[in-house]
Amino acid sequence: MGTLPTSTFKNYLLRILGWEIGRSTEIGPGLYLRLTVVKLGDHVRIGPFNVFRDMAEVRLGARARIGQWNWISSALPLVEARGGGYLRLDNDAAITARHYLDCSGGVSIGHHTTVAGVRSTFITHGIEWRSAAQTSSSIVIGDYCIISSNVALTPGTVVESRCVVGMGAVAARTVGPEGTLQVGSRVTAVKSGLEGLYFTRYKGYIRDIKARD
């Protein structure tokens, strides 16, 4: 059923299966496998060719967007043992295209935040060498953030609100303070006091194209 094209009829069928779907929400063709709870707000858009697999919860706030060719999944044995297994996007948050999100420990993304570009990797579980066992920890991203292309976020990462994480950065701790530009393979704040329309805008998904200077 998930492979059907976007339509009100598809939404009707998914509601029969227990999905909560708001008004004017569009769900593109993709693979939606073993999702326990799905709650989509009004005017949500999920693009085509995404994979959602083995998720305890997928919750998208009003006007949240997920683009195309993203892989979003969790490891069920970890979720059963430790909790997690959720993706939560607040209102007006967006994930663009071709990103990989391991949600075993849970991923929360604040309002008006954009996971931009392509090929960022969110990892929330791994092997602990001391115990020789698998463990998991959530990733939490604040409000009005930008996560650029090819960013790697490791288990337990917290990105404070209004942070911009530069392309190719690796985050393995709390990324902050608020309103800073963070770059590097060991992410470091290189500029503070960021200001701009992005951090105060009402609209979520960025469509505007800046004219040449």
Image (cartoon, rainbow, N blue to C red):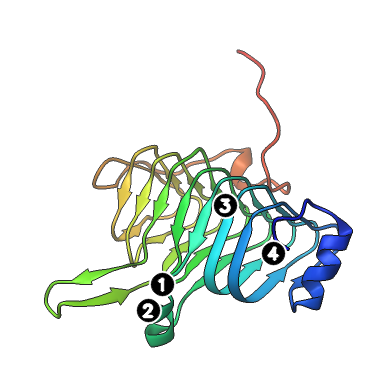
Q: Please name the amino acid that badge 2 sits on.
A: Leu
Residue lying at the far left in this picture: please name it: 130
Question: Which of the two discs, 1 and 3, labels the residue nearer the N terminus?
Answer: 1
Residue topped by disc 3: 113
The residues tagged by marks 3 and 4 sit, at their Cα atoms, a distance apart of 12 Å
Q: Mark 1 to mark 2: distance in Å?
A: 6 Å
In the image, taking residue 124 as reference, residue 28 lies left or right, namely right
* Mark 3 to mark 2 CA distance (whole Å): 27 Å
| Residue position marked by numbered label 2 in the rendering | 78
Relative horizontal placement of residue 34, taking residue 46 as reference (left or right):
left
Under mark 1, the amino acid is Ala
At x 48% / y 74%, what residue is drawn?
85
Whole-percent x, y for residue 103 in the image: 45, 67
Q: Residues within 10 Å of mark 4 (few under 14, many from 20)?
A: many
Where, quadrant-wise, is the N terminus in this rendering?
Answer: bottom right
What is the three-letter code of the residue carrying label 3?
A: Thr
Few, some or many residues within 10 Å of mark 3 (<14, 14–19, 20+): many
- State the separation of the CA atoms marked 1 and 3: 25 Å
Circles 1 and 2: CB distance less than 8 Å?
A: yes
User: Tag 1's secondary structure?
Assistant: loop
- Mark 4 or mark 3, which is nearer the start of the sequence? 4
Q: Amino acid at mark 4?
A: Gly
Q: Nearer the viewer, mark 3 or mark 4?
A: 4
Residue at image location 61% in from the left, 45% down from the top: 68
Q: Nearer the viewer, mark 1 or mark 3?
A: 1
Rendered location of residue 145, percent (x, y): 52, 50
Residue named by callout 4: 61
